[in-house]
Amino acid sequence: QVQLVETGGGLVQAGGSLRLSCAARRLTFGSNTMAWFRQAPGKEREFVATITGSGGLTYYAESVKGRFTISLDNAKKTVYLQMNSLKPEDTADYYCAARVRSAGIFTTPWAYDYWGPGTQVTVSP
């Protein structure tokens, strides 16, 4: 069974940075797609960023483009989300997701097969 575990969340002031990590177990990145989503209280889960298992393709939500960077380390089986210039509206629970059916760019939650439990990010004004 694939397992994903996110770490790196916390409280940061607006303008600050955080790096989230997602450690994957029993998963080979090469033919898969990894992504980050987030969900704020009372809102639906929304797409943040995705990367193909080869690392060759990335795609970002407009709201984070230019501020967030997704990357992966195949040797460590870890996906990262570097978040810079954080804003209060970035406050949410952040989730790592894996799609094992095929690789590509997918931005909807139902396209993904496995999810981590999430890590909380709070950005104060």
Image (cartoon, helix red, strand yellow):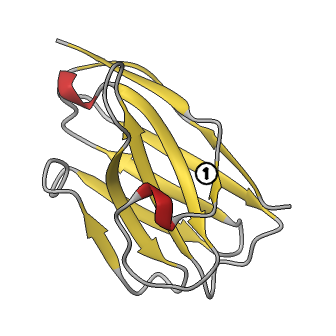
Q: Quadrant of the N terminus?
A: bottom right
Type of amino acid at the residue the image marks with label 1: Cys
Tag 1: Cα neighbours inside 10 Å, few (<14), some, or many (≥20)?
many
Of residues 89 and 109, the one drawn nearer to the viewer in this rendering: 109
Q: Quadrant of residue 99?
A: bottom right
Q: Quadrant of residue 25?
A: bottom right
Please report the residue visible at 48 percent of the width from the left and 60 percent of the height from the top: 110
Q: Is residue 31 left or right of residue 110?
A: right
- The secondary structure type at the circle numbered 1 is strand
Residue 111: x, y in percent?
A: 48, 67
Of residues 4 and 114, the one drawn nearer to the viewer in this rendering: 114
Outermost residue, top direction?
Answer: 125
Residue 87: x, y in percent?
A: 18, 28
Please report the residue visible at 43 percent of the width from the left and 84 percent of the height from the top: 104
Q: Which residue position is annotated with label 1?
A: 22
Please report the residue visible at 44 percent of the width from the left and 42 percent of the height from the top: 19
Q: Quadrant of residue 49?
A: bottom left
Q: Quadrant of the C terminus?
A: top left
Q: Is residue 10 left or right of residue 42?
A: right
Residue 101: x, y in percent?
A: 62, 81
Of residues 61 and 19, the one drawn nearer to the viewer in this rendering: 61
Residue 116: x, y in percent?
A: 64, 45
- In the rendered image of this protein, does residue 95 appear above or below residue 105? above
Please report the residue visible at 31 percent of the width from the left and 35 percent of the height from the top: 17
